[in-house]
Amino acid sequence: MPIVMTINSGSSSLKFKVYDMPEEKVLCSGNCERIGLPDGIFTIKYNGNSDVTYPVFPNHGVAAKLVVQSLIEKGVIQDFNEIKAIGHRIVQGGKYFSSSAFFNEDTEKKIESLIPLALLHNAAHLTCYRAFKEALPNCPAIATFDTAFHQTMEPADYTFPIPYELSKKYDIRRYGAHGTSHQYLSLEGLKYLKGVKHPRIISCHIGSGSSITAIKDGKCVATSMGLTPLGGVMMGTRTGDMDPSVFNHVVSVTGKSAEEVYQMFNKKSGFLGVSGVSNDTRDVLAAAENGNERALLAVQIFCRRIADFIGQYFVRLGGCDLLIFSAGIGENEPRIRRRVCHLLEEALGVKIDEKINSTARGKEVVLSLPESKIKVVIIPTDEEVMIARDCYAMCIKGK
């Protein structure tokens, strides 16, 4: 029973799962939260148990050591050598990676060079990789990139209309994000498209960060996020796409620095900025239902932007066979799905079962009615299992 571990790290968190491969059985999962703060939280689930403790994590290294030590203490493994590979989720792979890669000096340098394109993510990923390398020095490590799936886009889909020399010199282009999720969803979605020769799928990964992707024959054709995860649809705290001159105008009228405005567009905009209530969709929806006009406006903008991208990608694909909702909001918020689908009804013939939609949360289900011109489904995403599959394929299978 080859065992692999997947790691999904943030600036102050470290999520992990341990798999028995190739059965894809989850042996253990957990999360180190509030790394670098005085009140850490460590959650670990194993053998039907769930334990929560409150250690202090000064850094990712301490968190990584606690994770691997806990696997022994909880009886998940008997020896560290049982872990045959560790797979790390990396948000930004730039132009360098169209598939997962072994961690080595070159991979590390390339990920480091891309930190400016993923300030909140790539630095934390590297810190976490180095922490696990120290904790498990003999275990091979794999990097799985959120951007890799989108490398099949054509130049006309990823090139920005700025002076071409700038694009080439500084690698300024659309890279997208959530690629591992979109790839998983496209593979899972095929079971609904038996007999369809050239499947056309529009995948909606809608959470605190959101992206829409057009997929044909299993390959990404177009995606909503841009150079960084700031682009595309409106999100919890991010603007999404808008007139670029807004940036310069805000700098001019407020006297804030370019960096301050950039941070504003990343962390204080979106649902939070428009509603003035919260970055959490549930809070904003509740406020909207209680008559808060700004909250209602935020919900309307969000749903219309999603519908706009779906319509755009319907044209780009020459039609759509399957529309997938996934991630935190897509899987769990019937009110958002209903609004989006109603916006698509007249133009694209989308019709959903209101009763099924109203109770569907966190489970795979068909939402569309038989007469709908596009099949609509919820598929819970699973980025970790895609990383585990890459670990197994690259480090274990065939050896």
Image (cartoon, helix red, strand yellow):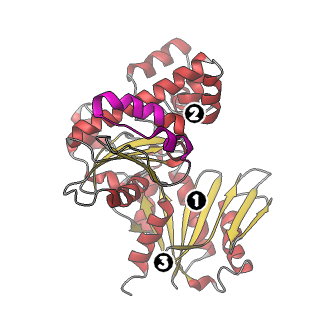
Q: Nearer the viewer, residue 302 or 48?
A: 48
Amino acid type assigned to the residue bearing label 3 in the image: Glu
Residue with the mark numbered 2: 267
In contact (CB < 8 Å): disc 1 and disc 2: no
SS for callout 3 = loop
Amino acid type assigned to the residue bearing label 2 in the image: Lys
Question: Which of disc 1 and disc 3 is earlier in sequence?
Answer: 3
Residue with the mark numbered 1: 127
Amino acid type assigned to the residue bearing label 1 in the image: Thr
Q: Residue at x 50, y 19 (%)?
A: 251
The stretch drawn in magenta includes residue 355 = yes
1 vs 2, front mark: 2
Q: Quadrant of residue 257?
A: top right
Q: Quadrant of residue 136?
A: bottom right
Q: Which mark is residue 23?
A: 3
Q: Residue at x 27, y 60 (%)?
A: 194
Q: How many marks?
A: 3
- Cα distance in 3D space between marks 3 and 1: 30 Å
Apparent side of residue 354 relative to residue 370 in the rendered image (left or right): right
Q: Residue at x 32, y 59 (%)?
A: 190
3 vs 1, front mark: 3
Q: In the picture shown, does residue 153 fall above or below 341?
A: below
Assess disc 3: are there few (<14), some (14-19) or many (≥20) residues with their C-alpha within 10 Å of its C-alpha.
few
Can you see residue 108?
yes
**Region rendered in magenta:** 338-361
Residue 328: where, in percent of width, then height?
55, 46
SS for callout 2 = helix
Question: Which of disc 3 and disc 2 is earlier in sequence?
Answer: 3
Residue 156: where, in percent of width, then height?
20, 40
- Cα distance in 3D space between marks 1 and 2: 23 Å
- Main SS of the magenta part reads helix
Assess disc 1: are there few (<14), some (14-19) or many (≥20) residues with their C-alpha within 10 Å of its C-alpha.
some
